[in-house]
Image (cartoon, helix red, strand yellow):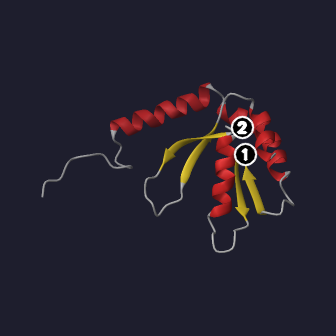
Amino acid sequence: MVELPHGYTYSAHPVGCAAGVAALDILVKEDMVGRVRSLAPYFEQAVHSLKGHPHVLDIRNYGLAAGFTIAPVLGEPARRPFDIAMALLEERLLRPVWRRHDPASTSVHRRARRNRSADQRAGRCAQ
């Protein structure tokens, strides 16, 4: 067996270190923390406006991250979250960034579109 040399996540590989430093530079230069602080109240208000919806069991958020517990369809636990995700994609409120090709996985990571202001997107997603 031939082992191919490669870098591990925590091995201080120069490429990984350079990417980390570049990400930190952008975080500081674009005042990302300040932007999150200023947008979080709008986002929180929009997200929590879904409270009481018949399919939303729980809502939690921190900054610009939110999580929802969605009531499952009996016998098809992934059906309702899938339908919600497809509706958001159809409305162009989300777009796929990376998709696992593992058929056993339903995990899809998405990123919000940047063509509207963040508070407008938050309100539109809640609709």
The tally of labels here is 2
Q: Single out the residue that lies furthest toward the top.
A: 29
Residue sitting at x 21%, y 47%:
5
Q: Nearer the viewer, residue 91 or 18?
A: 91
- CA distance for labels 1 and 2: 6 Å
Q: Position of residue 51 (x, y in %)?
A: 85, 58
In the depicted structure, whether residue 22 falls above or below residue 84: above
Q: Position of residue 49 (x, y in %)?
A: 86, 51
Residue sitting at x 41%, y 33%:
18
Give amino acid for label 1.
Answer: Gly
Q: Is residue 47 visible?
A: yes
Q: Quadrant of residue 89?
A: top right
Q: Secondary structure at mark 1?
A: loop
**Which residue is denoted by mark 2 in the rendering?**
36
Residue sitting at x 66%, y 58%:
81
In the depicted structure, whether residue 95 falls above or below residue 81: above
Quarter that holds the C terminus: top right
Q: Single out the residue that lies furthest toward the left.
A: 1
In the depicted structure, whether residue 27 falls above or below residue 62: above
Quarter that holds the N terminus: bottom left
Give amino acid for label 2.
Answer: Val
Q: Quadrant of residue 35?
A: top right
* Label 1 or label 2, whichever comes before in sequence order: 2
Mark 2: few, some, or many residues within 10 Å (few <14, many ≥20)? some
Q: Single out the residue that lies furthest toward the bottom.
A: 75
> Mark 1 near mark 2, Cβ–Cβ under 8 Å?
yes
Left or right? Give the position of 111 relative to 13.
right
Q: Secondary structure at mark 2?
A: helix
Q: Nearer the viewer, residue 46 or 24?
A: 46
**Which residue is denoted by mark 1 in the rendering?**
63
Q: Position of residue 66 (x, y in %)?
A: 71, 51
Left or right? Give the position of 2 relative to 31.
left
